[in-house]
Image (cartoon, grey):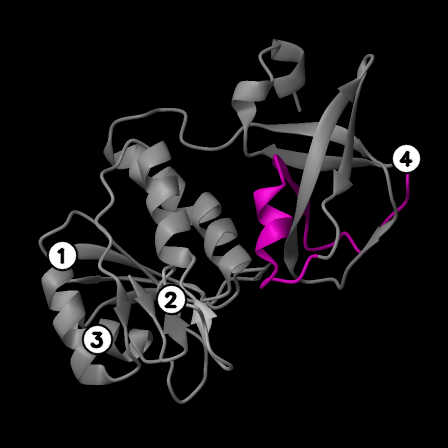
Amino acid sequence: MATGDELVDIDTNPSPGKIVNSNSYSLATLVDDCGGVPVILGITRDNKSALKQKFSTALKNDVIISSGGVSVGDYDLVKDIMVNMGNSMYFWQVAMRPGKPLAFGAIKGVPLFGLPGNPVSTMVSFEQFVRPYLLKIQGHRNIFRPVLKAISAENLEKKAGVKNFLRAIVKREKDKYIVKTTGNQGSGILKSMVTANALIILGEKETKIKKGDKVTVQLLDDSLFKTDSFLSV
């Protein structure tokens, strides 16, 4: 379920100030990839009545995933609905970028992941939180994406205190693995995620990475790499 007065569906030519609802479809694809059956509930406008009605409809499902409405603006109402309808919000905000304004709770026992609205934030948050949860409740043991060490092909820099997930492309060159970002890392730039096959993970204390340094890489498309050596950290 996507929330926002600014959203229009993919078959609508967006007028000024409007944004195409890509999140519903990217999330549906990711859920399907996890073995789940996605139910697209469409766009919900930024008012409490509409949100309550849509969440009530969603309660027949095993898990609810929404995007948008979890930040700190006047129209970010999902957190309030989560508390009012379910009296249960387990956490809000995570020290990560992109994806900080993530909320998790339950409504009448049904788990609810309130993901950020920016397309990249939505997908990165899904990979780190929702995907492992969906695999876990299906009985899988290996619920996390594989990680490896790769050599950075560029200098990287960030602020301390927050874990960063940079969209990247990793490839093997002889006996080494080389990784490079997909370019501009803005959380609204969908292309940065679409072209990526991995995420560079920079920990809270990492602030500067020099070209040639090793970095931690999380694979998004591990089917491309079959050798055991690739999956070693």
**Residue 212 — which label?**
4
Q: Nearer the viewer, mark 2 or mark 3?
A: 2
Image: magenta residue range:
185-211
Q: Position of residue 230 (x, y in %)?
A: 66, 17
Three-letter amino acid code at the position of disc 1: Gly
Three-letter amino acid code at the position of disc 4: Gly
Q: Is residue 12 above or below residue 204?
A: below
Q: Nearer the viewer, mark 3 or mark 4?
A: 3
Q: Which is nearer the eye, 1 or 63?
A: 1
Query: Residue placed at 37% from the left, 70% from the top?
Result: 8
Q: Nearer the viewer, mark 2 or mark 1?
A: 2
The CA distance from mark 1 to mark 4 is 48 Å
Q: Residue furthest right?
A: 211
The CA distance from mark 2 to mark 1 is 36 Å
Mark with earlier residue (3, 4): 3
Mark with earlier residue (2, 3): 2
What residue is shown with label 3?
51
Query: Residue placed at 28% from the left, 78% from the top?
Result: 45
Mark with earlier residue (4, 2): 2
**Residue 174 — which label?**
none
